[in-house]
């Protein structure tokens, strides 16, 4: 695969995955195991690189909703095996979360205000908080801190550009109407 193209102009998750993801067939097969592509009401994609001791690792994400669930596909480059003979692996997973478990949604926008007073969109953040407890910490005999699972999606001028920011806004609005 060559350099990824922008996925935002595509209305089909299949077409978008084929131009944006390194592993589109894997992503689409795993997503189809959870949701009929025709039922997908909105989607967003992200990818990035991390520097690991063994080299550059790619991560890829696709988030879709059918109006009842948030379905997350993620794949990460990694290594497995003994430290002296590691082998490269791709860890991929797909997860389905009922929208009814989402207790709070925050869709934030940041704008630059130009000299003439006009605004220019520079960042969109979508945060979703669930009632799924991931850990708790006993503070005292009567107090416990409870930490619930949350998800954060960010697009900006430098991370995806205007079209992907607009698609994240659309995705957040579709989720909001379904909650």
Image (cartoon, rainbow, N blue to C red):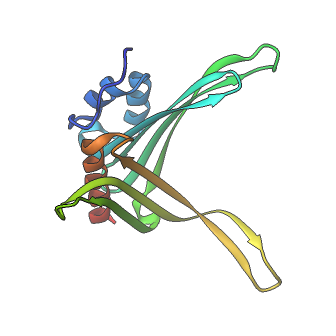
Residue 72 point in image, percent of width and height? 45, 44
Q: Residue at x 74, y 17 (%)?
A: 86
Residue 33 vertical position relative to residue 116 in the rendered view, above or below? above
Please say if 48 is above or below 69: above
Image coords of residue 169 (percent x, y): 28, 55
Residue located at (32% from left, 23% from top): 18
Relative image position of residue 115 (x, y in whole percent)? 21, 60
- In this view, 78 is above or below 84: below
What is the quadrant of the N terminus in the image? top left
**Above-or-below relation of 56 to 64:** above
- The answer to which quarter of the image holds residue 13 is top left
Instruction: Determine the image quadrant of residue 159.
Output: top left
Indicate the position of residue 27 as horizontal and vertical percent values. Answer: 42, 29
Nearest the viewer among 6 and 149 is 6
Across the whole image, how many numbered discs are drawn on residues?
0
Query: Going by the image, does 129 lie left or right of 2?
Result: right
Locate the C terminus by quadrant.
bottom left
Residue 99 relative to residue 49: left or right: left
In the picture provided, is 48 more to the left or to the right than 19? right
Q: Which residue is drawn at the image coordinates 20% and 35% (left, top)?
A: 9
Please indicate, yes or no, whether residue 41 appears anywhere in the rendered image. no
Going 36% across and 47% down the picture, which residue do you hit? 156
Decide which of 87, 70 is in the foreground and name it: 87
139 left or right, relative to 61 = right
Q: Nearer the viewer, residue 159 or 18?
A: 159
- The single residue placed furthest to the front in the displayed view is 115
Q: Is residue 117 visible?
A: yes
Query: Residue lying furthest bottom in this view?
Result: 142
């Amino acid at each position: 695969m060559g350099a990824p193209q922008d996925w935002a102009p595509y209305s089909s998750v299949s077409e978008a995955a084929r131009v944006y993801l390194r592993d589109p067939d894997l992503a689409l097969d795993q997503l189809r195991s959870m949701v009929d592509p025709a039922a997908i009401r909105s989607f967003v994609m992200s990818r990035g690189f991390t520097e690991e001791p063994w080299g550059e690792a790619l991560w890829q994400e696709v988030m879709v909703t059918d109006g009842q669930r948030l379905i997350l596909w993620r794949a990460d480059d990694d290594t497995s095996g003994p430290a002296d003979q590691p082998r490269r692996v791709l860890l991929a997973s797909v997860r389905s979360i009922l929208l009814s478990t989402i207790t709070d949604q925050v869709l934030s926008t940041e704008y630059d205000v130009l000299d003439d007073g006009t605004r220019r969109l520079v960042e969109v953040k979508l945060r979703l908080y669930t009632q799924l407890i991931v850990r708790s910490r006993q503070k005292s005999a009567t107090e416990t801190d409870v930490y619930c699972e949350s998800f954060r999606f960010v697009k900006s001028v430098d991370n995806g550009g205007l079209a992907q920011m607009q698609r994240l806004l659309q995705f957040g609005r579709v989720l909001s109407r379904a909650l």
